[in-house]
């Protein structure tokens, strides 16, 4: 990278950046007589912008004597290149950046995505130390994203460390000369908030934020010494209190109490409020882990009306995600059976806040399990195009309530959950009515169906849906469909020689489909229905030219695909002992 080249081989780096050929005579004659100590330096040790910049390196690092070290210390002109050129260099680095992986990012410590992102940040930091000009250019890239998802087993200081004392009062007793280490103590959101309080202009650069929804029982410091030396100054506390003072009376006292106690979630919430006015902020991802969304004030900060002022908050945000922890195999840490019995996260109570975001286009919610008393009317999200609902106990009725607020929805990926132990069954006709609320715009539809305790003996035999989806011809723009096979093909009567007649999929599915996939789970109630469903799938796909064009089976032509190959590619949860007609 460029930053490493500047440090490792200064002379070659200068030649490559400036395009100027430098021979030995140039190197010796270009050294000025003015001592370098006469050039004023900034507080961070950089040469000011209006003075020449020196590309040099400690002779101890390069194993050079004094004469050789002086020979490579040359004034360079590459710092006076157009700003646009340096921005192009930073853009190249930025395109190589990989965001933190959504799956397993707190488990896989050697994840290449995390390693690449860290390396890119280090490159930016190295370039920013060259001179003030480059520092100002790179600053926009250094502060364009913030990701803080600590490891799952990370421990946090308890609140009782301060012994009920006010953190602001403790900080007044700090010494004039701070200890170097405690000054840096505190979690990254706390340190970033301090930086933005002192330099508010940095907030305008942020494009994405990925943070943990901190617990209200977590603090900032492990002991009183850290609290005294590392806490905010009086001016910084005043700025936080000024922000809280503009909140409604209902929230103000709760936030002020948490600020005085040093609650981690309050400082994370204040950071979100500071970033909410950025015109470049596009994506927000909050990790749900150990507490309810009703307890942590981080989620209160997502309310666009939580600050009573004219400035619109989250006006540029287009994507919001409430994510959950997963392991290396992308399996959820939260057990779905336990979650449906007792929802400790209450994500459904946050939906109305998110739908109020003026430019929201994508909403992804994990662990959203609406109760029977869920709101019947939600704010209209006229810009929402993509909706993802995973790992939650969502039913067809509640899904319809949510779809009523998304009139322009184009993509839907939803998991429906039903508990057989309490005799829950999916009414596919009701699901069709719910989905029909967006039939004019829906283009991509993925429905997953999970049955809890499927082996429960209730005297009704294998679990089955109520009726099927019926006709979906009115979904005129639907091009991608992925649904369980059990919702599309009805149970075959046990009558010898019975045949359903014309292909039911061809009769019910829209003609606009380009891709069609089906899930074997939950399995059909009997073997006859399973065999008939597989026969219908093969017949439907083989007759549809566009569907066949999207199938790939090694190097074979799509026209040579047999029934088994079609089933293998169209049906999920494939197993070897299937049989076809």
Image (cartoon, rainbow, N blue to C red):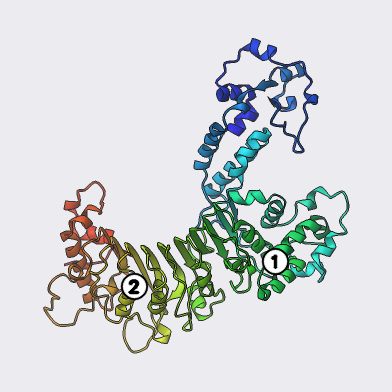
Q: Residue at x 47, y 64 (%)?
A: 364
- Disc assigned to residue 437: 2
Residue nearest the observer in this picture, 65 or 53: 53
Question: Quick one: 394 or 358, which is closer to the camera?
Answer: 358
Q: Position of residue 262 (x, y in %)?
A: 75, 65
Residue 212, x across and y down, in percent: 60, 62
Who comes first in sequence, dot 2 or dot 1? 1
Considering every residue shown, the one lying at the far bottom of the view is 459
Q: Is residue 506 left or right of residue 197?
A: left
Residue 439 figure quarter: bottom left
Expressed as whole percent of the image width and height from the top left, the position of residue 393 reads 45, 75
**Label 2 crowd bin: few (<14), some (14–19), many (20+), radius 10 Å:** many
Question: Residue 198: which numbered mark, if any?
Answer: none
Residues at marks 2 and 1, CA–CA distance in whole angstroms = 40 Å
- Residue 578, by quadrant, is bottom left
| Horizontal arrangement in the rendering, residue 24 relative to residue 334 (left or right) | right
Q: Pointer 1: what residue? A: 244
Nearer the observer: mark 2 or 1; the answer is 1
Pick the residue in front: 341 or 225.
225
Question: Neighbour class for label 1 at 10 Å: few (<14), some, many (≥20)?
Answer: many
For label 1, the SS is helix
Give the SS element for disc 2: helix
């Amino acid at each position: 990278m460029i930053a490493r080249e500047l440090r490792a081989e200064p002379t070659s780096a200068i030649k490559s950046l400036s395009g100027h050929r430098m021979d030995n005579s140039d190197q010796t004659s270009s050294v000025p007589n003015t001592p370098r100590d006469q050039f004023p330096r900034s507080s961070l040790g950089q040469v000011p912008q209006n003075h020449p910049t020196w590309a040099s390196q400690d002779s101890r690092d390069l194993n050079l004597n004094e004469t050789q070290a002086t020979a490579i210390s040359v004034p360079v002109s590459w710092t006076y290149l157009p700003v646009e050129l340096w921005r192009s260099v930073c853009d190249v680095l930025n395109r190589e950046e990989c965001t933190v992986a959504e799956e397993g990012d707190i488990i896989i410590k050697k994840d290449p995505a995390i390693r690449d992102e860290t390396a890119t940040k280090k490159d930016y930091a190295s370039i920013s130390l060259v001179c003030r000009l480059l520092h100002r250019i790179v600053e926009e890239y250094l502060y364009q994203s913030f990701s803080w998802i600590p490891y799952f087993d990370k421990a946090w200081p308890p609140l009782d460390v301060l012994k009920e004392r006010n953190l602001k009062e403790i900080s007044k007793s700090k010494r004039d000369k701070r200890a170097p280490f405690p000054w840096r103590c505190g979690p990254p959101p706390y340190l970033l908030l301090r930086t933005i309080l002192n330099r508010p202009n940095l907030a305008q650069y942020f494009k994405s934020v990925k943070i943990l929804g901190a617990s209200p029982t977590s603090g900032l410091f492990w002991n009183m010494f850290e609290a005294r030396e590392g806490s905010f100054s009086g001016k910084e506390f005043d700025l936080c209190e000024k922000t809280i003072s503009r909140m409604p009376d209902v929230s103000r006292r709760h936030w002020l109490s948490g600020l005085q106690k040093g609650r981690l979630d309050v400082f994370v919430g204040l950071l979100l409020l500071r970033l909410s006015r950025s015109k470049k902020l596009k994506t927000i991802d909050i990790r749900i882990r150990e507490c309810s969304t009703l307890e942590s004030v981080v989620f209160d900060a997502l309310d666009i009306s939580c600050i009573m002022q004219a400035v619109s908050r989250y006006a540029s945000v287009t994507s919001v995600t409430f994510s959950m922890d997963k392991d290396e195999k992308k399996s959820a840490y939260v057990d779905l059976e336990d979650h449906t019995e007792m929802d400790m996260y209450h994500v459904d109570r946050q939906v109305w806040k998110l739908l109020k975001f003026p430019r929201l286009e994508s909403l992804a919610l994990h662990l959203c399990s609406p109760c029977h008393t869920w709101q019947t009317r939600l704010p209209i999200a006229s810009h929402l195009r993509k909706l993802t609902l995973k790992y939650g106990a969502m039913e067809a009725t509640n899904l319809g309530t949510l779809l009523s607020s998304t009139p322009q929805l184009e993509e839907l990926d939803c998991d429906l959950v039903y508990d057989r132990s309490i005799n829950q069954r999916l009414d596919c006709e009701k699901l069709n009515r719910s989905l029909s609320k967006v039939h004019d715009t829906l283009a991509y539809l993925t429905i997953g169906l999970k049955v809890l305790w499927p082996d429960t003996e209730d005297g009704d035999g294998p679990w089955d849906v109520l009726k099927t989806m019926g006709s979906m011809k009115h979904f005129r723009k639907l091009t991608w469909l992925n649904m369980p096979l059990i919702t599309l093909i009805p149970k075959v009567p046990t009558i010898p020689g019975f045949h359903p007649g014309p292909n039911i999929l061809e009769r019910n599915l829209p003609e606009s489909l380009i891709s069609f996939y089906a899930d074997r789970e939950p399995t059909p109630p009997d073997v006859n229905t399973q065999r008939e469903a597989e026969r219908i799938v093969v017949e439907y796909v083989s007759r549809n030219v566009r569907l066949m064009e999207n199938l790939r089976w090694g190097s074979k032509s799509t026209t040579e695909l047999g029934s088994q190959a079609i089933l293998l590619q169209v049906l999920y949860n494939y197993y070897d002992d299937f049989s076809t007609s």
